[in-house]
Amino acid sequence: MIQNSLKALSLSAIAWMPMMAQANSADQIEVKHAYVREVPPTAMATAAFMTLKNNGDHAILLTKADSRAAKIVQLHTHIHDNGVMKMRQVPNIRIPAHGETKLQPGGYHIMLIQPVKPLKQGNQVKITLTFDDGSHKTITAPVKSVMGMSMHHMMQH
């Protein structure tokens, strides 16, 4: 009886091992150069930018972002549609194994829609990133003014 119970317990543990090994996507992601763009106080939205580096052996999907700084937070990209740049919500953002994905102006970004209060240079914004395995990583991004920043500086930070 005890032997059967131990065998069942061992089989249960083995069945959970692959899930446990994959339940760490957030730990595999390194976030660099995160910032939120400062916009006028009357603006209805702003965006967060950063570089997501995947130190793992498998591609990871960013599936959601949350922040108390805005009523709505969405993953977005820009597309060219008949010569016009349009912003579109996306279901996820892929970070390749041992690679990077840049969230930057004109590309992927996190939209912060209907900010709860004006976001001014020097403020800090907490953003929780959720990955395809359900794991989370909370980052703090400074609000930066893009006025006077060169395009190269914006892309690097």
Image: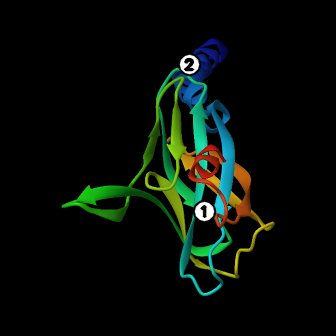
Q: Badge 1, how many Cα within 10 Å: few under 14, some, many 20+?
A: many
Badge number at residue 82: none
Q: Position of residue 126 (x, y in %)?
A: 72, 60
Which of the two residues, 21 or 32, is positioned nearer the viewer here? 32
Relative to 19, say whether 129 is above or below. below
Badge number at residue 14: 2
Distance (Cα) linking label 2 and label 1: 34 Å
Depth-wise, is mark 2 or mark 1 nearer the camera? 1
Badge number at residue 66: 1
In this view of the protein, can residue 80 be seen by the observer? yes
Q: Look at the numbered disc 2 and give the secondary structure of its residue.
A: helix
Q: Earlier in the sequence, mark 2 or mark 1?
A: 2
Q: Quadrant of residue 46?
A: bottom right
Name, please, the residue furthest toward the bottom: 42
Is residue 144 left or right of 25 when viewed as pictured?
A: right
Relative to 113, say whether 136 is above or below. above
Q: Look at the numbered disc 1 and give the secondary structure of its residue.
A: strand
Q: Residue at x 60, y 59 (%)?
A: 48
In this view of the protein, can residue 135 be seen by the observer? no
Q: Position of residue 75 (x, y in %)?
A: 47, 58
**Cβ–Cβ below 8 Å for labels 2 and 1?**
no
Q: Residue at x 47, y 30 (%)?
A: 96
Which of the two residues, 145 or 125, is positioned nearer the viewer here? 145
